[in-house]
Amino acid sequence: MQMRLADIQQHVGGEMAGDTNVVVTAVNSLELAVSGEIAYAENDKYLAIAKQSNASIIIVPKGFPELAGKNILKVDKPKETFIGIMMMFDDAGVAFSGIHPSAVIAEKQVNIARSVAIAAHVCIQENVTIGANTSIDSNTHIAHDVVIGEHCKIGPNVSILSKVTLGHNVTIHAGTVIGGEGFGYFWDGQQQKRVPQLGVVIIEDNVEIGCNTCIDRATFGMTRIGKGTKIDNLVQIAHNNDIGEHCIIVSHVGLSGSVTLGKRVTLAGQVGIADHITMGDGSTAAARTGISKDVKPNQIVWGAPNRPIKQVMREMASIPKLPALLGQVKNILKRLTDVEQKLSRLGKE
């Protein structure tokens, strides 16, 4: 893709300076950009780097110091504008169209919109509906009783098992499994016996799910991922979880059964949550937190078991002081022993 500075300005607005016909073919950071690439400086802290940058075009905020000899586009929000430009240059879109002849599609009760793209070796079972402008990449399995909305992107080697519903504009990356059996067993006195998982999975609009993530179907009722939520790679979401809107769930997070997350909850890497826990709206769990009790709205927790993050930071700050403190305690105990011995001798005189 090639774009002139003038073309970019037409898309995003702003004030141009320099050669408006200069052409760029890629995006990059200020430090790494070479001729033919566009970069951005979020504020004047990056002035020195911007002066040395080889980028052909630099996006800067209005009021940014002058950059002699540079091709500039001044905008109100350079970071957001640059992300929009990155999307223009994103070449990770669908590279196939139509239905590949190797795809296996059931003959009964399958409703596929005309604009759907289905790649090689996709398997689609009965009673499936797929909305307009959705793409399904190679080797993906769509089981029976699945509904997929419009403008969805399903990556390669994805398994969407029975009784799963995807909203519109849902993205599922490679290797993910949606609707696998929840992990339910009971001890009958001799062995672990499986509890049937008969519920469904609901993925709402604008959800993105990373590679090799697993979202289990419910025992009864549903496992729900609220609209706008973004889930990283290698995440486990167990049966009957209710994930609120616009949450962020980072890699290696594991949620036990029947966990409830409110809106805009953030789970950093390797967080583990016990079953039947509730995290309130706007709450955050820092990396490697083990959550064994409910978290209040807007609270930030850390540690295992989870405690308010400021409390954990105070506890950690006190650890280096322990050797000196122990030395003081030993000294005090010795002095007390000396005093007791003196008092004992005085009592005998």
Image (cartoon, helix red, strand yellow):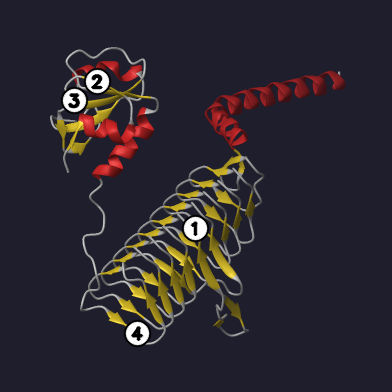
Image x and y of residue 187, in percent: 61, 80
Give the label on residue 50, or none.
2
Q: Amino acid at mark 2?
A: Ala
Q: Quadrant of the C terminus?
A: top right
Name the residue that disc number 1 marks: 254
**Front-lying residue, 111 or 303:** 111
The disc placed on residue 20 is: 3
On the image, the x and y values in percent for residue 171 come to 38, 58
Q: Secondary structure at mark 2?
A: helix
Q: Nearer the viewer, residue 118 or 28?
A: 118
Q: Earlier in the sequence, mark 3 or mark 1?
A: 3
Q: Is residue 160 left or right of residue 2?
A: right
User: Element at badge 1?
Assistant: strand
**Mark 2 / mark 1, whichever is N-terminal:** 2
Mark with earlier residue (1, 4): 4
Mark nearest the camera among 3 and 1 is 3
Q: Which residue is label 4 attached to?
A: 106
